[in-house]
Structures are given as structure tokens and as C-alpha cells.
Image (cartoon, rainbow, N blue to C red):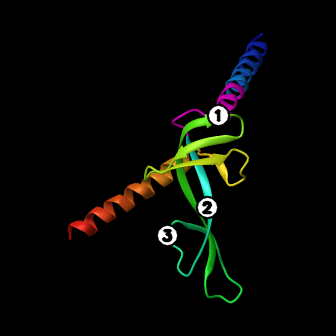
Amino acid sequence: MNVFLICASIIGVVGGIFWLTIIWLGKRSELQPGDFLIYRVPEYSNRPGPAAQDVYPSPKGESYYYVVRKLLTVVRVVGDEMVEVTTPAGEHRMLSLKDPMLHKAGFIERLNIRLHLDDRLIRSEVGSSA
């Protein structure tokens, strides 16, 4: 009898976690105003900055190709294919939801980018006051 109760409890817990996960994933896919998005912007320069990722030299080695992650905030969703976003600097952009470089920011991504932005703001304030 005890084995039956233990098995029933485990099945109940696993089933509950499964349904909560399905509900959570369903809500994640819908964009709402205020949600954070990450847009990976391809760039090209002689000196990549500290936010550069996937850095590759050009064929002759004089410059670099790289990607920079930009944190955007959803202002409104326009239909099924477009979204209006704002940058931390306050600029507004319209982006396609089908763009492969655009995805919803996860918790760790938001935390990393926020810490990076806060660090840049602190450094700029210290540099301007000196």
C-alpha cells in the first residue's frame, strides 16, 4: 500500500510540473508591452568593443566581423509579424518577428546585459566628473 501511495505522489508531482511548464511556455511565446528582447546586430570594425561576440578576422586580418547583443523593450506588437521596440537610449524601431537575430530575452541574458549597461553608465559618469 505504501508503494502505491509513493508512486501516486510522484506521478502527481511530475504531472503538475509538466502542466505548469506547458502553461509557462505558452505565456512566454506571446509578447507583451514591457517584455525584453535581444537583437543580435552584426557589425564590422577595426577594434571590436567589450560587448562583441563571435569575433572573426576579415580575410586579410585588417578588421573584424562580430555580433553585438542589444537589449530592446517591446512597446507594442503590430499584427502577427512586426513589433515596435525601444532601445535603452530611447530610440524607437520596428522589427520583424520573423527575424532570426531577434529573440525573447531570458532571465540570465537580461541580468548580464543590465549589469553591462549599469557598468558602462558608472564608468561614463566617473569619466565625465574627473
Question: Which amino acid lies under the numbered mark 2 shown in the image of this protein?
Answer: Val
- Residue appearing at x 66%, y 32% in the figure: 30
> Above or below — where is 91 with respect to 58?
above
- Residue position marked by numbered label 3 in the rendering: 50
Q: Earlier in the sequence, mark 1 or mark 2?
A: 1
Q: Is residue 25 magenta?
A: yes
Say which element carries label 2: strand
- Residue appearing at x 51%, y 36% in the figure: 34
Q: Position of residue 110 (x, y in %)?
A: 52, 47
- Residue appearing at x 76%, y 15% in the figure: 8
Q: Position of residue 79 (x, y in %)?
A: 68, 34
Q: Earlier in the sequence, mark 3 or mark 1?
A: 1
Mark number for residue 41? 2
User: Which segment did they paint magenta?
Assistant: 22-35
Q: Position of residue 18 (x, y in %)?
A: 73, 26
Q: Earlier in the sequence, mark 2 or mark 3?
A: 2
Who is closer to the viewer here, 10 or 82? 82
> Above or below — where is 128 with respect to 21?
below
- Residue position marked by numbered label 1 in the rendering: 28
Q: Residue furthest top?
A: 1
Question: Which amino acid lies under the numbered mark 3 shown in the image of this protein?
Answer: Pro
**Is 85 left or right of 4, judged from the image as shown?**
left
Q: Position of residue 33 (x, y in %)?
A: 54, 34
Asked which quadrant contains residue 77, the reply is top right
- Alpha-carbon neighbours of circle 3 within 10 Å: few (<14), some, or many (≥20)? few
> Above or below — where is 4 with respect to 33?
above
- Alpha-carbon neighbours of circle 2 within 10 Å: few (<14), some, or many (≥20)? few
- Alpha-carbon neighbours of circle 1 within 10 Å: few (<14), some, or many (≥20)? few
Asked which quadrant contains residue 130, the reply is bottom left
